[in-house]
Image (tube, rainbow, N blue to C red):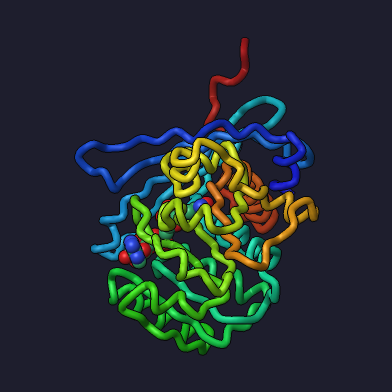
Amino acid sequence: MAYRLHAAGKTINPDSCFLRFPDRPNSRIIALPAHIAGPIHKSGIKWISSFPDNNASNLARASAVLILNDGATGYPIACIEASLISATRTAASAALAAERLSPDPFEGTIAVIGTGMIARASLQWLLFRGWHFSSVDVFDVDRHGSEQFSNWLSSTYALKATIHDRMDDAVVDSSLILFTTTTLEPYVNDEGLFDHHPTVLHLSLRDICPNVILASQNIVDDVDHCLKARTSVHLAEIETGHRDFVAGTLVDVLENRCELAHDKARIFSPFGLGVLDLAVGDLVLEAARSCGDAVAFPDFFSNSARW
Ligand SMILES: NC(=O)c1ccc[n+]([C@@H]2O[C@H](COP(=O)([O-])OP(=O)(O)OC[C@H]3O[C@@H](n4cnc5c(N)ncnc54)[C@H](O)[C@@H]3O)[C@@H](O)[C@H]2O)c1
């Protein structure tokens, strides 16, 4: 629903604001303000940190809060832990894209490149949606990360993963490829790697080099958002000077306005829209209220009466 409201112009989703640190170039905190009209009718902002060095001390890379604002008064009405909301909306949107972009959805082989939290959430969603994988091939620059992912997969789903020492070996036979790394510079430059025309969920946005992007069919969540911040599709735009290589958005695919290519890889690059966090955050708030888990602070706005 959030994607459709966004496509129908019933959302406001300004550019994300990146706080970067010159002495820690791999880290950042991003603010994603958004408004969503229609039945949700809320505004809000997700404030999400990415500190990849946390992983070394077994602390999750991403941490986040979501502030929800009432659509009528503008008052903040909730402050919610949002790293799970963020991971869930990312994984759910990836699963939706996988279903709609794959010629034979719900079956095949999967490669997971970068085996962290988002990879885990995405696998959970794919399996929840009913996918059956005849093989799971994984690669992570940190082999220990692959081993932890593989142990989780086998203990939770009785699925066996094959751990590879090279990314190429993991993707070569996979019909569905998930990129969930933290790389900042693209490194997938061999167009031949996608000769078998896989569906590629490029969630980490900066793994695939412009030549491979240009040789593939590209679907994004929002064209203006995704072609920014030196994502792979942004680099392809800088290189070519145009955006003609973007075939459409996920909503175009959902509404059959975009014909899928079967003679090349189909790459889904979602920038990750703040309106998705609002929509999922709103569900979480309603669920917390109805089961009594929401904690109220009745006097938080003690000076709200104007006179
Ligand atoms: N598009 C979206 O909407 C969206 C939303 C949330 C997160 N993300 C992105 O997903 C990515 C993964 O997030 P996470 O929370 O799982 O991070 P994480 O730190 O838990 O896991 C990332 C893993 O990638 C591995 N890695 C780094 N570079 C690699 C490379 N070149 N090849 C293989 N493995 C590599 C790391 O060792 C680590 O295990 C991040 O880039 C994040 O920004 C995207």
Q: Quadrant of residue 96?
A: bottom right
Q: Is residue 153 above or below residue 260?
A: below
Q: Position of residue 214 (x, y in %)?
A: 52, 52
The image quadrant where one finds the C terminus is top right
Task: From the viewer's perspective, tell me whether residue 135 is left or right of residue 139.
Answer: right
Residue furthest toward the top?
A: 307
Residue furthest toward the left?
A: 23
Point out the quarter of the image occupied by ligand 1: bottom left
In the image shown, does 258 or 93 lie closer to the viewer? 258
**Residue beneath the point at 40% across and 70% down:** 115
Q: Position of residue 10 (x, y in %)?
A: 74, 35
Q: Position of residue 158 (x, y in %)?
A: 51, 89
Q: Is residue 236 above or below residue 87?
A: above
In the image shown, does 303 or 268 lie closer to the viewer? 268
Q: Position of residue 216 (x, y in %)?
A: 56, 58
Q: Quadrant of residue 127?
A: bottom right
**Residue beneath the point at 35% across and 80% down:** 164
In the image shown, does 288 or 30 lie closer to the viewer? 30
**Residue beneath the point at 39% across and 61% down:** 188
Q: Quadrant of residue 76?
A: top right
**Residue beneath the point at 69% across and 35% down:** 11
